[in-house]
Image: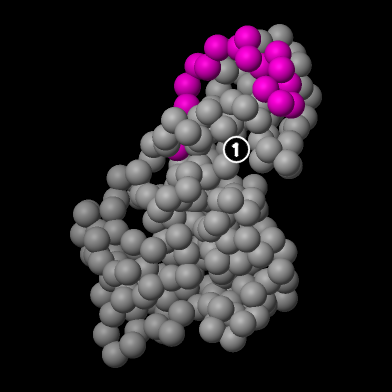
Amino acid sequence: MAWGYARGADKRGVDIIQNCEVLGMKIENGRVLGVETSRGFIGAKKVGVAVAGSSSRVMAHAGMRLPIESHVLQAFVSEGLKPLIDGVMTYGAGHFYVSQSDKGGLVFGGDIDGYNSYAQRGNLPVVEDVAEGGMSLMPMIGRARLLRMWGGIMDMSMDGSPIIDKTHIDGLYFNGGWCYGGFKATPASGWCFAHLLAKDTPHSTATAYRFDRFAKGLMIDEKGQGAQPNLH
């Protein structure tokens, strides 16, 4: 799916530069002029930051500390099985989800790791917890062999809702704090972020996703659990 977005952007004239690490931002007189990268300086009148679990590290180049914590979320894939699930099953009490890929593998996961980390690897207690959730929902899953697992970095905001806003630095915009929902929300998120970048005003559906809501006590009560795994 990520490659599908990339191909669509490429057809519309977007330059995609791979293996290009952001090393810093050039800011003068309160305005961003571009980014320093491992492949040289890239100048820009506007810079949009949408880097998920690396949000805090990238925005630190602009001297900003975000109301976001980064946690690892592990995912698992079993060996290929005959058709078993034709949708997505979730188990709220145990915080477990599972679906089946076109190749037959069960794709499943559960809670984020309980500590802050930028490492894309998980730990065994969460593996055990996810396995217990799966066994509670589908006891027969215990007979399937685990094929692979990985960890992705989640940008967990303090109220469980995203931030789509311009910063106090002219020309610098931010989109992050999507917690578990970033990948699924990409189409709507991108639409709202593009509106903000183009018109310098938030989209009508994203006016509440501001930085200053935390300072003003205007947290969004959609989830209200933020980065505390024990509350999910």
Q: Is residue 123 left or right of residue 36?
A: right
Can residue 116 be seen at all in this image of the molecule?
A: yes
Above/below status of 85 relative to 25? above
Q: Percent x, y for residue 141? A: 66, 16
Residue 180 rendering spot, x and y as whole percentages: 59, 50
Depth check: give the residue in front, 160 or 194.
Answer: 160
Determine the residue located farthest toward the bottom in the rendered image.
Answer: 29
* Quadrant (top left/top right/bottom left/bottom right) for the N terminus: top right
Front residue of 115/47: it is 115
* Residue 72 falls in image quadrant: top left
Whether residue 149 is in magenta: the answer is: yes
Residue type at numbered disc 1: Gly
The structure residue drawn at horizontal position 73% and vertical position 41%, both measured from the top left corner, is 93
Q: Could you say which is closer to the camera, residue 72 or residue 21?
A: 72
Residue depicted at x 42% and y 36% = 122
Residue 139 placement (x, y as % from top left): 71, 17
Q: Residue at x 71, y 26 (%)?
A: 136
How far from the left and from the top, in percent, is residue 120?
A: 38, 40
**Residue holding disc 1:** 110
Instruction: Residue at 50% x, 16% y: name it.
Output: 147
Give the residues drawn in magenta, as a range: 135-151
| Residue 46 shows in this picture | no
**Is residue 227 left or right of 138 when viewed as pictured?**
left
